[in-house]
Image (spheres, grey):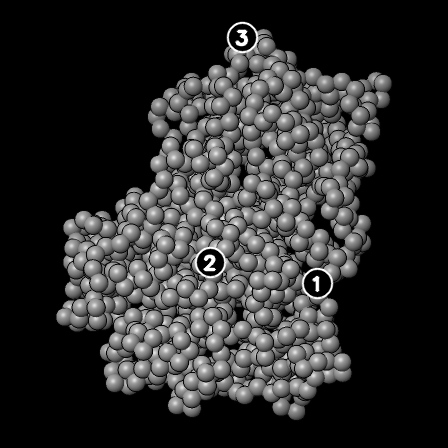
Amino acid sequence: MEAQGIARGAPTHSPKDGPGKPAVPQKNAYARLVQKHHSGRFRSYLHHIAQKLQLEEDALNDSGSEAEAALKSGLVREALSRNGVLGPGSRSPAGAPQPGPAHPSESREPSLPRRKRDPGPGRGEEDEVVEEEVLAPNRRGDAAVPSSARQVPGSQGRSPRPDFSPHKTASFEERDREEARRSSREGHAVPGRAESFASPGTFGSDPPAANTRKGSHLSPGRTQGGDNRRGIARTRNHSESARAAPHVDRRRQLSESQADTMNSSDCRATLRQLGTPRGGPHATGSTPGDRKNRNKASRGRKKVFEAYMSKEEVSAGLKRKQLIQGPLRINPKKYHEAFIPSPDGIRDIFIDGVVARNRALNGDIVAVKLLPKDQWKVIKPEGGDHEAEAAQESDAPRNPPGASVVNNPAKGDADSPDVIIEAQVDDDNDDVESSREAKDLQRLSLGAGEKGRDPEGCSGHHAKQEDSPKANDPEQVLQKTGKVVYILEKKHSRAAMGSLRLLTDRNSELFKKCAMFSPVDHRLPRAYVSLADCPPDLASRPEDYSSTLFICHIVDWREDSNFALGQLAQSLGQAGEVEPETEGILTEYGVDFSDFSPEVLQCLPQSLPWVIPLEELAKRRDLREECIFTIDPSTARDLDDALSCKLLPDGNFEVGVHIADVSYFVPEGTALDNVASKRATSVYLVQKVVPMLPRLLCEELCSLNPMADRLSFSVIWKLTPEGKILDEWFGRTVIRSCAKLSYDHAQSMIENPGKAFTAEELPPMSPQHSIGNVHRAVLNLHRIAKQLRKQRFVEGALRLDQLKLSFTLDKESGMPQSCYVYQYRDSNKLVEEFMLLANMAVAHQIYRSFPARALLRRHPPPLTKIMNDLSEFCSQMGLEIDFSSAGALHKSLSETFGTGRYAEAKKSVLTNMFSRPMQMAVYFCTGVLEDEALFHHYALNVPLYTHFTSPIRRFPDILVHRLLSASLGAGPAPRMNCKETQKQADHCNDRKTASKRVQELSADLFFAIFVKEHGPLESEAMVMGVLSEAFDVLVLKYGVQKRIYCNALPLVGFRFQKVGKKPQLSLIWEPENPEQEAPEQEIAIFTLVEVVLKSDGSPLKYSAVLKRPSEAESGAS
């Protein structure tokens, strides 16, 4: 065992670097520690050490002397017995003889001794500061050089840092995986982490026989009572433990060894008898160890999960408020942690462990029963609130909050003008899972150590910053904890992208019948799939499929199995390639990208070219002679909105917003209507669009193409030059656009008001309208839009501008050629203002006509707890931010920072933080909410809002068109009642969230490819979070967030401290030559640094590396 250099008063931490062969002197030190410490937490620590020894022997079962291992395990049991943990005749927590020594290569060096520092003036004995040795690998990968960390005024108790080995370096993601494995050993049934629970009858296997072997490489003659455990516990492929830094995107680890981890049923220990329950007690009243022993005695099958309540029991429990209903969100970095919203809206309810989650998947609507109060989670305010450990996803480019990346954004992307305001807190804000899980803001910004405050999560890299919370600590916060008792609605698609491997026990019957499917998304369970559905040569040539992606549908997950049952659907192709990855993402998120059926296509006009019937023309206002034009991204092909502006004789303006009348082509109840309602939205990927409607409609019949007659729905106002509405008209029209302007064209007109543009500088234009007429109309719209925008913010609207990427793709290969931050300019704002004005006007119109059936869009206020954390953070940083309302927040952001590069970067970081507490805006039917105050849109600060302006790509807009037509007497009232409308609204919300997530993943895919093909990429970055041995940065040039680990840098050492309440890392760089003094660099929130983005060499993985500061910059923050 390795000495960890435990500081006075700091709780002990389990080693993290994996099992190692102990040296003789350390055994004596270990025994002395056992004699001196008798706390329950220390006994938990001892249990953990015993488990680690057991894991070591499992991994090396046939390499070495059994006698030596037995001697070692005997010493451990003796030490545990002295501490009262095990009785004289007790078995070790691992529960099995110990047949093998540690491999010599896994032995670890003893850590260096720690030095104590005399108390400073005014310090009592209890305030004595322990000097920590901070070690880091040198540039050559040699043995680490110790460096005594200096005490900095204002610093708090620091965590000790173990030595770094060139062979095995601990990392944060290793700890994530270890916590998951520890969770399984402590009573969790971790999905896909044990092969011992094959369901009865599965593939015709014999469950007792399968349990006896349990996938072991040991001789079949060894029984369950003896060596019943897995043979080799492997780390995942490309494991960070073999490198200096954990730059691996866990979503992309697809090798066989990714899934070949410890058998959870063999690794369960009895730590939960000593500490706060995590997963086991949620399902049964016995401890995991008790259940394990009973399993051994009977060799019978035991249930892993509780049976679900009946529908009647759930219904009654919800009515009596004994159960709580909500969407399940699973932490993507620590999949044994999950949450549902609390009815009080303050702190989410914690679902601790896979057993407590009870087979529910991310996004499912579940019924949850609260556990007794003594099992609730204890959180200290300045500690690591693990409610959202992975909200930042700094190491995973697939989900950087606030970095929604678009390719020449089209309508419907992040920069769609009619949603750009709410997009910053809705469409562009991280999805519900991430924004609600962003509760680690406090952990990042207030500087608590990585996983350092979890009462049960012991870090092997550093000791905790403080003692664990005491029961009488007045600062303690209890988080309600519960367990899932029923899945009310399976929102998750049950489709997964992942890899295949053979089972480890080639002698088992199960090996001959099935293979193991390992999802890329670790929140999903591993699944048995029939070998008959797998490639025929998988059994003989498994290495050929190690990097092949497959799609699997989860068809069942039984109570008595850690594994789901899956049905292999298809092979996608090689991991890391654009098309296989894209198809996997679309399938996993339930996006229908299939061709439209003949039945659907029959609903389209069959005689082409299509012309507007004369009888339809007679019903509409003819605007074909008016100067009407579109303004869209240059690549857009689905043009669903147009603008007009005409100066009136009295000095006022007639301004029109003209929207494609898609509802004319999509009658209610048709096959086309059904498929559009199911798809609910177009999905915008970097390289293509998955349309909601057939392309004949999207790009031709409905698209407001120039010089073509098109049916439209128009809202026309009479406005003063200041933007005051004097009159308003709604109606069905027919228009003929005179020009297709891009945002660049419109911006050029705005920036050059006196310029006479030539025909060569602009797109083709109708001869009926001169270039000068169009130019004047754009300028007039711009002036009015500025007034409308100014008035909106005066009245309390909020805008959060986040950095977004755009790509330029190679026309032949489709690969990214360039990457740049999308600029949101006056031309975007022009279109945005009039789309917002139209949406608000239509919302009032349909609500007046259909008060119980109108389809509107509301935006709830931000989450109170996270907003309070932000407020506290800003106060600590000396920032005066008013969080009292959306308008106050916007005003603070606009006025606090001023101008300049540093001010803009600082504003970008805070804007990103402020987006986290924002909830998603949602569609709803007015009849389901009695209180009109709930209709309010927080970001826009308006009472009523809807979506009317994008019917080509959003199904809710089609429903709104039908309501508007009926309110004007121009069409029949929709047949859907309030309940049906709300059901459709819920579905549209789900599909919108999925579409947004897919868009993000597509952007992450292309950015990872861009880094690989064009990297390394250098950029300025700003620090946005400081941890005990890492820090998060916002890469300003690309708008992505990355985490930089200290142990990945060529440092002599580093130290973490707090100056007041502000976290700070001091990095001591290796000198460039031996004669120089080691330069020191201070890292704090809002520090500007230079970073380099580099590909890790594996598919879709890249990391950020901090550039060495110059001598002049060393030590500057």
In terms of image quadrants, where is residue 750?
top right
Relative image position of residue 618 (x, y in whole percent):
58, 8
- Left or right of 554? Residue 430 is right
Judge whether 621 appears above or below 908 on screen: above
Mark 1 vs 3: CB contact within 8 A: no
The numbered disc on residue 1086 is 1
CA distance separating discs 1 and 2 = 28 Å
CA distance separating discs 1 and 3 = 64 Å
Q: Is residue 258 visible?
A: no
Judge whether 903 appears above or below 450 on screen: above
Depth-wise, is mark 3 or mark 2 nearer the camera? Answer: 2
Residue that protrudes farthest toward the right in the picture: 650
Depth-wise, is mark 1 or mark 3 nearer the camera? Answer: 1
Q: Residue at x 47, y 67 (%)?
A: 175
Relative image position of residue 636 (x, y in whole percent):
56, 37
The numbered disc on residue 410 is none
Q: Amino acid at mark 1?
A: Phe
Judge whether 453 appears above or below 860 on screen: below
| Pointer 2 local density, CA inside 10 Å: few below 14, some 14–19, many at least 20 | many
Mark 1 vs 2: CB contact within 8 A: no
Q: Earlier in the sequence, mark 1 or mark 2?
A: 2
Q: Amino acid at mark 2?
A: Lys
Residue topped by disc 3: 615
Mark 3 vs 2: CB contact within 8 A: no
* Residue placed most toward the observer, 722 or 983: 983
- Left or right of 919? Residue 3 is left
Relative image position of residue 314 (x, y in whole percent):
41, 36
Secondary structure category for the residue under label 3: helix
Residue topped by disc 2: 334
Q: Residue at x 42, y 82 (%)?
A: 1
Secondary structure category for the residue under label 1: loop
Secondary structure category for the residue under label 2: loop
